[in-house]
Image (cartoon, coloured by chain):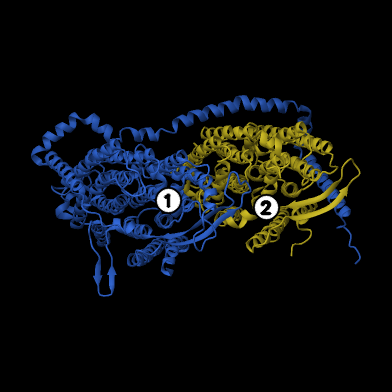
Chain colours: A blue, B yellow
Amino acid sequence: MALYNAAWALLLLPLATAILSFITETPRRAAQLCFVGSVLALLLSAMVLGARLTHPLQSPFTSLLTFFAMSPPESALFASRFQAQVGVYVDSLSASFGFALAFVVVVVQGYALTTLRAEGGYRRFFWSSSLLATALFGLVFSPNLFDTLLMWGLGSVAVYLVLALWWERGDAAAPARRAYLALHTADIALLLAVAFVFVKFGVFSSSLPAPSGQSLVDPFGFDQFTRFAHGVVLGVVPGAGLRSLAVMASVLIFAAVLRAAQVPSFGWLTGTATSALPAIALALSTAGFGGAYLVARAYPLLLAPLHAISALALTGALTAVAAALMCLVQRDVLRIAVLSAVAQFGLVLAALGTGGYGQGLFVLFTALLFSTLFLLAAGNLVRVYRTRDIHEMGGVRGRMRTTSAALLVWAGGTAGLSLATYYALSSVFENAKPAGPAVGALTRVAVAFLVVVAAGLMAAYALRVLWIVLPGVPMRRRGFQPERVAEVEPWLRLVTRLGTVGAVLAVIAGLPGIGPVHAGRLSIPGLTFTRFVYEYNRPALLVDGWALLICLVAGGLGAVAATFALSPARRAAASGLVERGEPVARVIMRGFELERVGHRVGAPFLAAGEYVARFDDSITETLSDLVAQGSLLGSDVVSRLRSARTTLYLAGGLTVAGVIALLSILAATGHLWVHPL
Amino acid sequence: MIPPILLTAIVFLSSIACLVVMMMPERTEDQRGRVRIVGLFTSGVQMFITLAFGIFIQVGLAEGGGQSSANEESHSWFSSFAFSSGYHLTADGISLVLLVLTTVFFFSLFFHSWRVRERVRLYVALVLLLETAVNGVLCASDYVLFLLFWGMMIVPLYVLIRVWGGGERRAERARAARRYLVLALTSYGLLMLAVLLVIVRAGQHSSDITTDFQNLPGPVAAAGFWLTLTAFGIALGAFPVHRWLIDAQSEASPGVAALLTGVASKLGAYGLIRIAIGQFPGPAHQYSLVIVGLAVVGAIWGSLGALAQDDVRRAIGYSNVAQVSLLVLAVGTQTSIALVGAVLFALAQGFGIGMLILLMGAVEERLRTRSIRALGGLVAAAPRLAAFWWVGVFTLIGVPVLAGFSAIVMLFTGAFPAHRIATLLVLATLVVTSAGLLWMGHRMFFGPLRETLQRVRDVGALELSYLLPMIAAIVLFGVRPGAFTPIITNGVLEITTRLSGG
């Protein structure tokens, strides 16, 4: 168990390197220091994961520190103790995601070491990304809702700092601001949830027996949520019924959906596509991951109120379809990367919303690695072709082998081989997770339909990218020499390969039915991801034949559609089709106008602000002046104070008066004179 | 061992220094430097006493498992009138935390006084006098003393607003100073009326604040409550009596504006907690909906008003209106958790807003403009200045690891069960306030650097000297709020016990 204390080091190491990076001599040293810190964090996370893998049945490790505490006397309103704790909570879930995130941070920082070297803000990117890593690890190993709020808040600021790397460009700085406001709104929603949880469960939690090693039950503790939810269902929690639970679930889901950039709030994340590539990669992993992870941790509270969890499933599925559709008509490769990740996060929430806890988390696990992989590949393309328009690329296959392989793996995974769509759909079909009531039939049908459509669309856009980018020759344009197109620098190649291997291994970890491994003294029991994080004591998931078949058919149809539309023979016909449907495509490309609405959400506030200022300038100021005019006599007297001499005299007089008062006080209290003993 | 005259030293050292300063010459730059050094040294000693003997001993006591207790000095003063009055100074958790705010702030401000070029001696003397008044208000445990110190603030602040601030906008400054004077005197008058009413009608024959005036007749208690609520509301600059503060802080010189908004106005919050609800718990409870309503409207008003401003100082002023509404919300909800949060928030907000005003002063000094439209891309020319600005903004927004975070969490967790809808509305305005501050920061610092701003100097050693103590306090209270909550709770419990009729 002592090994799990490494989770503390995991949290503090990136923070330490972020702080130390300020005192390094050069930005390059700072970058290297932060990168080394991240690599060490990866090793530590591997140790934690290894310990967990070899002892999967061990109960979770908890280590807590009190952040603040007080004992409110209002027993009718609050529990007898209000204690906010921070700490680490190591279970299979946190160990797995700790490793995955450490891997993502290493890969992204490794990529940035080369690509951002010539950019301004090199040092800033690295310390802020290390700060973000701290927030991410803190979130993953968070033992309770309060700690999650703290880490969300820290993560929001870190994402803002990372995204605002190119502050001198308005088109990059404004999305950073929008992103921060969206994340901050989610933080505030979570704050509301924290208050709600304390008010509703505080008193109940103090009546429960405290876990061993702790003086009281933490009302914010994730490990207590199942007890709370059961208590509410049984009607033994004073002042909390199913309605309270529904409100709580709605607030939590609102926060998660906003943070995971789901419909209708995806605009803040898609807008970040104008930022530096490593910044986008980190923003994606934080944002989408943070939202979905909250859902996973607060799952017991979300399951009881049926409508809330159904809404989550529908929102996720709808987002997957919308984002996939948008990907289909985009030309900007970075925007495709961001939207693709949004679609994957949609699938995560769809699976979680239909009761597929393990499945949803597996989709999240692969989504993290696949979105990072595609961003690396897209970054290579942008670096070499000096454009973000995929139609200006081409001929990658023969010229950039590592990038081609990365693109192939990403496209294969997105088209269905990563099992994301399969798992999402199987959770709809299975729909019989413990502790949760079955989602309604209508919702199931709707979610299943949307997931199948999303599966087809995802396969189509993934193959579209491949079809456009891999074959052919690069487009000739001014200032660009196609013949000089070659693979990126060796270091970037290495990082891209690492990303590719990571994505492939993630899928392998999720393959259903992998049995235990025995090699000499080493014994690793059944390794499937879903079993490891959730269902260890249950039989491994069997392959759901229907789900697999439907996903394969949908993916195949998407692939066929993409091939059909983009094959040289059909390209002319397809372009005619596109021209005819151009207005529709444009609307889809712009995010169904939701992005524009999101960007203009501040306009009514600005208009209202104008009215407020005008009212203050006219009415309030006039009233103040009226009051002030009433004291003309006084103002006349004080106007004489303009001369410095008078002011001096006045201040001197006041001081003397003060001193006299002081002396009189001292005399009266016996402090002025020295009394004989 | 706590020195027996700890609080007297915290309050009166600066007035002794004021006397010394008034006798010092200021003809040459060296002499003016010496005047500043006397001010700096005195406030440094006061800060040291507050931190070392005031708060850290209490923190140590609380962490050692002991009960932290209030520092107290009490001697009878006079009893010649219908009531007796004492030289009674007390500093419980609420006062001590706010004393950290005031003493650190004044210490920083004396570094900033090197920016003041005219009438240095008078400036330093008035600030020292003001420090006595401010610390006195926080420590006074007798109504007569309280009124003495409260009144002692008015003239120095008026003169500080009126006299300093350069030749530009002289007329506007005069008008703002006049408004301040009128409203400060009104506030003082209302307070005096309330005190007289209470002392005379309570029949306790004592003006001690710690006296429980439980036998006040209902109408008298209600009148006392409304009088003190109005008086402290004016001092706080809360809606609807916010305009004077916006005007005064936007017209005064940066140091004075920071002092006014960061420290002096927080005494209004202190008065609301200590006197308005602490002394009149019945009416405070009865009219809590009105207070909460004012908080909601104020939060909306301030957050929206800030969006429409082009003058940076006025935008900060409106944000301040929105943020003090959180303090008003805590006062309206009257739960112990919310009140502890409010005390922490007063500290965080005081430092945060003070930093922004001082930094804007630095920008103003370099560029001679306060218009947001005239700025842009400053981060390229002055990256450290931008970094400090963002620290201030993040403190106000309530980012973790900075002092505002725990304060906001406690404030809203405490307020939520008492007035849910109001808490939700105020919580929602936090987003608008944050958006306003962020947008302002972006327009000032981000985007392409304007040609006219290319030779702007970055923050220098002098600016660092007055910003770093504030940042240290912000981080200390952000990282270890748990060290201070037990001692604040001790102070708050006395008030909430009265509120619950105990």
Q: Nearer the viewer, residue B453 or A179?
A: A179
Residue A565 is at least partly visible in this image: yes
Tell me the kind of residue under disc 2. Asn
Q: Secondary structure at mark 2?
A: helix
Tell me the residue that label 1 is attached to: A226
Dot label at residue B490: 2
Q: Quadrant of residue A675?
A: bottom right
Residue A654, percent from left and from top: 81, 44
Q: Is residue A326 visible?
A: no
> Which chain is home to disc 1?
A
> Mark 2 touching mark 1, by CB under 8 A?
no
x, y percentage for residue B399? 51, 49
Depth check: A428 or B211 in front?
A428
Q: Which residue is drawn at the image coordinates 59% and 34% (left, top)?
A: B298
Residue nearer the viewer, B305 or B191? B191
Q: Chain letter of disc 2?
A: B
The quarter of the image holding the N terminus of chain B is: bottom right
- Which mark is in front, 2 or 1? 1
Give the vertical position of B185 relative to A86 (above or below): above
Q: Quadrant of the C terminus of chain B?
A: top right
Q: Whole-percent x and y of residue A395?
A: 15, 50
Which residue type does callout 1 highlight? Thr
Crowding at dot 1, Cα within 10 Å, few <14 / some 14-19 / many 20+, comes out as: some
Q: Do the residues at pointers 2 and 1 share their chain? A: no
